[in-house]
Image (tube, rainbow, N blue to C red):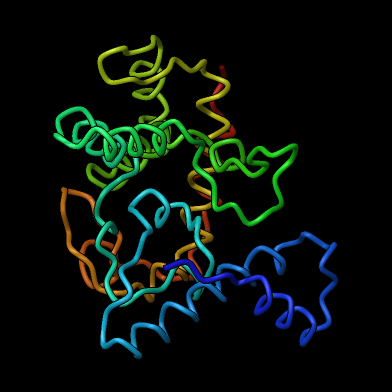
C-alpha cells in the first residue's frame, strides 16, 4: 500500500508557518518525521511493528532524522554496515531464482543512496548521500578500525591509505588519494562524536558483527563528547 504524505506534510508546514519553497533542514526532516508518524500509527492499528531501515553506517554518522527514520520498534539492520548490505543484496540478486526480483534488487543497487527529501532536478535524484557525507566504503573502514581495535586517527588514516591505494575489483572498492581519505576521515570523527545523541536512544536491534553502536551493548559514550582531540591530531598529518 502506498500512502501519500503530500497533504499531511503541507498542512504540517502550514501549521508551523514554514515556507514550502524553503528547502532547509526543517523541510527535509518534516517529511521524514511524518513518514514515521504514519508508520507508528499503522503499527498500532494493525498490532504490528515498525521495522527500522537504518544501518550501522548511518548510525555511526548520524545520517538519520532524529525521531524520524532514526526511530522504529526494532532496528533489524542496526548491526550491519552499508558496505556489507550491498554485498548481501548483490549476492541474493545473483543467486535467487526470481528474475523479476533480481532485476529490482540490481536496480536498487545501481541507484545512488539518497533520503530523497529534496525535489529532483530534471527528473534525477538531487540529494546523493555519499556526495554529502562521503563514500560509505571509507566510513565503514574507519568505523571498524576505530571501534573494533581502538586505533588512533593517525593509524586509521595510515591503514586506509594502504587499503584504498588501488581499486579492488573483487570487492568492488575504488581507489582514493590521501587528500580525499583525510578529508572524509575528518568528517567521520566530527559526525561520529556530534551525533552520539541519536545513538543514545536507539531502538532494540541485533548485534551481527564485531562492531556495534548500541548504548546497551558495545558503545558507552556521552552525548556531549567532542572530537577536538582526534581532529587536532589529524590536522598535524603532513600529506
Q: Quadrant of residue 157?
A: top left
Q: Which residue is painted at 55% across and 53% down in the image?
A: 115
The percent coordinates of residue 82 (x first, y second) are: 34, 43
Residue 238 against residue 16 in the figure, above or below: above
The percent coordinates of residue 112 (x first, y second) are: 51, 36
Please state, as top left, top right, bottom left or bottom right, where the C terminus lies in the image: top right
Q: Is residue 102 left or right of residue 124?
A: left
Q: Quadrant of residue 186?
A: top right
Q: Which residue is painted at 39% across and 67% down in the image?
A: 199
In this rendered view, identify the residue nearer to me: 222 or 78: 78
Please state, as top left, top right, bottom left or bottom right, where the N terminus lies in the image: bottom left
Q: Which residue is painted at 31% across and 74% down in the image?
A: 203
Residue 166 against residue 15 in the figure, above or below: above
In this rendered view, identify the residue nearer to me: 205 or 88: 88
Q: Which residue is painted at 48% across and 33% down in the image?
A: 135
In this rendered view, identify the residue nearer to me: 145 or 9: 9
The percent coordinates of residue 200 (x first, y second) are: 38, 73
Q: Quadrant of residue 132?
A: top right
Amino acid at each position: 500500500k502506498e500512502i501519500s504524505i503530500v497533504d499531511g506534510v503541507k498542512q504540517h508546514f502550514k501549521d508551523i508557518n514554514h515556507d514550502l519553497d524553503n528547502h532547509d533542514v526543517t523541510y527535509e526532516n518534516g517529511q521524514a518525521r511524518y513518514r514515521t508518524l504514519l508508520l507508528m500509527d499503522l503499527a498500532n492499528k494493525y498490532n504490528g511493528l515498525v521495522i527500522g531501515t537504518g544501518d550501522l553506517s548511518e548510525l555511526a554518522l548520524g545520517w538519520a532524522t532524529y525521531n524520524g527514520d532514526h526511530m522504529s520498534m526494532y532496528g533489524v539492520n542496526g548491526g550491519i554496515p552499508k558496505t556489507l548490505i550491498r554485498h548481501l543484496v548483490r549476492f541474493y540478486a545473483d543467486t535467487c531464482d526470481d528474475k523479476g526480483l533480481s532485476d529490482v534488487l540490481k536496480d536498487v543497487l545501481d541507484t545512488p543512496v539518497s533520503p530523497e527529501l529534496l525535489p529532483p532536478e530534471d527528473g534525477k535524484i538531487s540529494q546523493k548521500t555519499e556526495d554529502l557525507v562521503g563514500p560509505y566504503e571509507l566510513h565503514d573502514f574507519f568505523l571498524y578500525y576505530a571501534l573494533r581495535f581502538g586505533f588512533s586517527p593517525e593509524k586509521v588514516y595510515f591503514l586506509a591509505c594502504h587499503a584504498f591505494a588501488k581499486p579492488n575489483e573483487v570487492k568492488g572498492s575504488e581507489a582514493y588519494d590521501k587528500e580525499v581519505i583525510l578529508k572524509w576521515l575528518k568528517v567521520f570523527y566530527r559526525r561520529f562524536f556530534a551525533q552520539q545523541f541519536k545513538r543514545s536512544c536507539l531502538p532494540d536491534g541485533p548485534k551481527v558483527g564485531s562492531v556495534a553502536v548500541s548504548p546497551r551493548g558495545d558503545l558507552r559514550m556521552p552525548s556531549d563528547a567532542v572530537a577536538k582531540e582526534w581532529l587536532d591530531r589529524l590536522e598535524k598529518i603532513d600529506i
